[in-house]
Image (spheres, grey):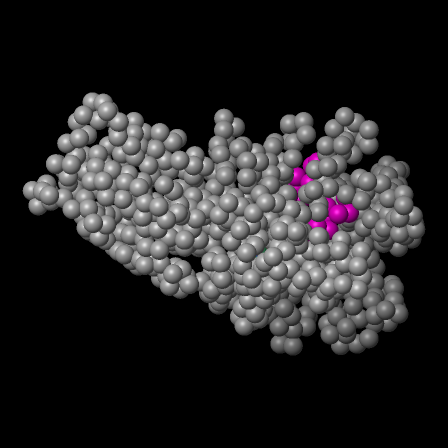
């Protein structure tokens, strides 16, 4: 008889236990034949065949016959009886030799009750199987079950209960008890299966919802796109903004804010009170250049060429810019130190900014800071304001449409501050490389990266730029042009541009050098070339009229007919005279619009030593006057004694020039000395320098501009502080050639040279 070992199954009479054919062949040494009798020995543990011993088996087993042979390699053994395993011997090849006796049941089963309970279990199983793909198979099987033993046997491979519990059923002699126990086991396992599958399907449901949602969204956006393409004219604003928002490539924070505002717009509807404001905001947000621009490869020689092509002169400035480009290239950065161009109007500060943008192959944008008083001008108003707007910086970025423009912040010296916050501190943040990657405009309310912006500031003077701002920037000075440079600029840039703008053909207008010189000296008085540019434009417009009326003519502008081509009278040239009078001396001043000459006039009247100063003078100048009086008294005690019986009046005519600043000290003191000594000083001698109470001449600023002004005015000789000799390097050769420049250390040297002798010089100092 065939003997097989089983483990972890419900082995009870009435059940069918399934094996693989291979298992059967291995255990019995023959192929299964239907009806063949099989003895089943039940294993306590899952032990391999070659390691089984007699006590690996329970003492009760079962006997049955091969009842089913499936074509898929399975066979079913239908169990008929229980057996006492009286003797179990494990043979060396692992097979068993048994001595068994039949073990009878106590048949006390209530058949009717049992039948009802089996039906109930079957229904339960069928209902449970309903939801699953494998349900139909299970149901088919279930139809055939008539006893609880069949059910337990068939399902037992999936039972979670332990093998001991299953064996306990076989060991139970009383049939009713065995039934109760078996039912309990089956029901428990069904419940367990239910709980498991429910948990699993709950999880599945979650996943499914998620997948579904994604899929629906994708589908929707696809369909919407199709629709939009079919009817581009009817794409709603909201929808268009939504698309733009997702495609703008903005940072997380901005995207979040954008979606928030979009949702508000959606719930507001197109006509709500805030719809306009929300739409404006989204329009701006989505059209900002969020995507980073690639840095271009720049050839230094090309950059240099572009700078040269656009601007004549300005050698130092161009050199510095090329250096900056080189450093940026080496460091792989799009922005470098912040440059601040300082100089008089019309010296090319703004236009060279444009040129730099061209040289770098980048966009150019100009942001005017003139008259900016509020922080909000720079950083925008919060959106809660009616009519709120972004600040000028973000407005500039919006206008140029790229993340890395060359941005010229024009007139940074004209910032002022008011009760509404200090614009300078907002600018500080814009220009700080540590902070500007996250610049937050109040209106936008999300950070924007300004770190690729190449900032250039322009100013006429450094005096009014707040110190912390100034520290951030590298100052580059634009000194103003000499007449010769102006000539070149007019010839090569201003005139050709004006000719082109007026539509005048090649060779139909000629301006002689002499005429140009006259225009420069008599029709302009400036450090830069703005006025000159206007004159060129005027010439061309006037010539255009003539050329239209006389198509055959050409126009030639000569010194004799220059006046006809001007729309203004020639300026009274501010040139120094030749007549010298005691008490009047020529000084040099620096102003934000360039250098200028000034006269200091002094007069003595009968009186008692009162000093009057007039001419809108600043406090510093008034103090200089006091100092001058003391110095002159000390130097010329004899001659100055008249001052005791006189009142002194000091006046600086021409209120247009700001006279605050100590650099007129040397002029003031000399004017006074000339007055008391009676020695006249020719107006063709000018001077600049601060004077100490010891009579030392100290350094001053703006020397190049002052010397240029001196030369323009026809001055021949200039006294300058020796401490300023270094600055002469910045003075055009042309100017130096025409002036006799005399560096001095003390005021005494000046007076010596002018022929004012003190009778008690040694005594005085
Ligand atoms: P700023 O900004 O210093 O006030 P701008 O840049 O506005 O001066 O210059 C005024 C005009 O003069 C512009 O048309 C500019 O092109 C021209 N200009 C100034 N300097 C030069 C120069 N060195 N070469 C050619 N054109 C110049």
Is residue 177 in sight in this rendering?
A: no
Residue 484 image offset from top left, x and y in percent: 49, 62
Residue 154 image offset from top left, x and y in percent: 81, 54
Is residue 388 in sight in this rendering?
A: yes
The relative height of residue 395 versus residue 544 in the rendered view (above or below) is above
The relative height of residue 527 versus residue 648 in the rendered view (above or below) is below
Q: Is residue 756 left or right of residue 401?
A: left
The relative height of residue 461 versus residue 34 in the rendered view (above or below) is above
The quadrant of the picture occupied by the N terminus is bottom right
Q: Is residue 257 magenta?
A: yes
Q: Point out the quarter of the image occupied by ligand 1.
A: bottom right
The residue shown at (62%, 72%) is 50
Magenta-colored span: 242-261
Q: Is residue 345 left or right of residue 184?
A: left
The residue shown at (62%, 55%) is 562
Residue 191 image offset from top left, x and y in percent: 75, 42
Q: Is residue 324 left or right of residue 237?
A: left
Q: Is residue 693 left or right of residue 31?
A: left
Please state which of residues 647 and 444 is positioned toward the viewer in this rendering: 647
Q: Is residue 216 magenta?
A: no
The residue shown at (28%, 40%) is 582
The quadrant of the picture occupied by the C terminus is top left
Q: Total label count?
A: 0
Magenta highlight: main SS: helix
Residue 305 image offset from top left, x and y in percent: 56, 69
Query: Can you name the residue that lies furthest to the left here?
Result: 763
Please state which of residues 489 and 297 is positioned toward the viewer in this rendering: 489
The residue shown at (32%, 59%) is 740
């Amino acid at each position: 008889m065939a003997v097989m070992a089983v483990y972890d199954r419900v082995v009870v009479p009435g059940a069918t236990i399934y094996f693989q054919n291979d298992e059967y062949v291995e255990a019995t040494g023959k192929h299964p034949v239907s009806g063949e009798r099989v003895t089943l020995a039940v294993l306590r543990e899952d032990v391999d065949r070659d390691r089984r011993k007699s006590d690996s088996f329970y003492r009760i087993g079962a006997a049955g016959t091969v009842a089913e042979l499936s074509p898929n390699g399975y066979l079913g053994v239908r169990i008929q009886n229980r057996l006492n395993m009286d003797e179990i011997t494990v043979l060396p090849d692992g097979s068993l030799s048994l001595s068994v006796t039949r073990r009878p049941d106590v048949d006390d089963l209530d058949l009717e009750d049992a039948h009802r309970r089996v039906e109930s279990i079957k229904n339960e199983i069928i209902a449970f199987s309903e939801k699953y793909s494998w349900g139909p198979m299970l149901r088919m099987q279930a139809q055939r079950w008539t006893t609880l033993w069949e059910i337990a046997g068939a399902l037992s491979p999936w039972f979670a209960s332990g093998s001991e519990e299953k064996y306990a059923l076989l060991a139970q002699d009383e049939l009713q008890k065995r039934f109760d126990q078996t039912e309990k086991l089956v029901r428990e396992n069904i419940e367990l299966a239910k709980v498991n599958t429910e948990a699993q399907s709950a999880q599945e449901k979650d996943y499914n919802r998620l997948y579904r949602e994604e899929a629906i969204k994708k589908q929707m956006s696809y369909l919407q796109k199709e629709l939009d393409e079919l009817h581009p004219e009817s794409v709603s604003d909201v929808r268009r903004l939504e698309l733009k928002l997702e495609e703008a490539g903005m940072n997380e924070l901005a995207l979040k804010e954008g979606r928030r505002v979009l949702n508000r717009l959606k719930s507001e509807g197109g006509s709500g009170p805030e719809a306009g404001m929300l739409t404006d905001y989204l329009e701006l947000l989505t059209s900002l250049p969020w995507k980073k621009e690639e840095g271009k490869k720049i050839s230094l020689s090309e950059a240099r060429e572009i700078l040269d092509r656009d601007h004549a002169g300005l050698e130092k400035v161009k050199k510095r810019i090329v250096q900056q480009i080189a450093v940026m290239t080496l460091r792989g950065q799009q922005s470098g130190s912040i440059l601040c161009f300082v100089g008089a109007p019309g010296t090319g500060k703004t236009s060279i900014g444009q040129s730099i943008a061209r040289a770098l192959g980048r966009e150019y944008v100009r942001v005017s800071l003139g008259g900016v008083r509020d922080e909000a001008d720079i950083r925008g108003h919060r959106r809660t304001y009616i009519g709120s707007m972004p600040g000028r910086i973000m407005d500039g970025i919006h206008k140029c449409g790229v993340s890395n423009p060359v941005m010229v912040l024009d007139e940074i010296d004209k910032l002022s501050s008011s009760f509404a916050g200090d614009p300078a501190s907002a600018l500080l943040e814009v220009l700080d490389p540590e902070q500007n990657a996250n610049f937050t405009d109040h209106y936008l309310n999300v950070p924007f990266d300004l770190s690729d912006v190449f900032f250039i500031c322009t100013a006429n003077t450094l005096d009014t730029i707040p110190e912390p701002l100034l520290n951030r920037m590298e100052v580059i000075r634009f000194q103003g042009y000499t007449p010769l440079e102006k000539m070149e600029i007019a010839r090569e840039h201003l005139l050709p541009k004006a000719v082109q703008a007026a539509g005048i053909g090649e060779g139909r207008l000629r301006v002689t050098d002499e005429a140009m010189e006259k225009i420069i000296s008599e029709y302009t008085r400036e450090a830069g070339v703005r006025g000159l540019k206007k004159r060129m434009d005027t010439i061309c417009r006037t010539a255009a009229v003539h050329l239209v009326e006389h198509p055959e003519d050409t126009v030639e502008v000569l010194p004799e007919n220059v006046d006809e081509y001007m729309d203004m009278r020639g300026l009274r040239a501010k040139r120094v005279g030749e007549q010298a009078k005691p008490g009047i001396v020529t000084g040099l001043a620096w102003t934000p619009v360039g250098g200028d000459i000034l006269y200091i006039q002094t007069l003595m009247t009968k009186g008692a030593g009162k000093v009057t100063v007039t001419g809108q003078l600043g406090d510093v100048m008034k103090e200089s006057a006091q100092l001058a009086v003391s110095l002159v008294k000390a130097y010329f005690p004899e001659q100055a004694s008249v001052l005791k019986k006189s009142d002194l009046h000091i006046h600086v005519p021409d209120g247009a020039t700001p006279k605050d600043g100590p650099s007129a000290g040397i002029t003031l003191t000399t004017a006074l000395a000339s007055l008391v000594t009676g020695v006249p000083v020719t107006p063709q001698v000018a001077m600049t320098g601060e004077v100490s109470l010891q009579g030392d001449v100290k350094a001053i600023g703006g020397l190049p501009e002052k010397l240029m002004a001196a030369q323009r005015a026809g001055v021949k000789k200039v006294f300058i502080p020796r401490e300023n000799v270094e600055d002469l390097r910045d003075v055009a050769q042309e100017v130096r050639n025409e002036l006799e420049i005399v560096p001095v250390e003390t005021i005494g040297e000046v007076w010596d040279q002018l022929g004012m002798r003190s009778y008690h010089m040694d005594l005085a100092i």
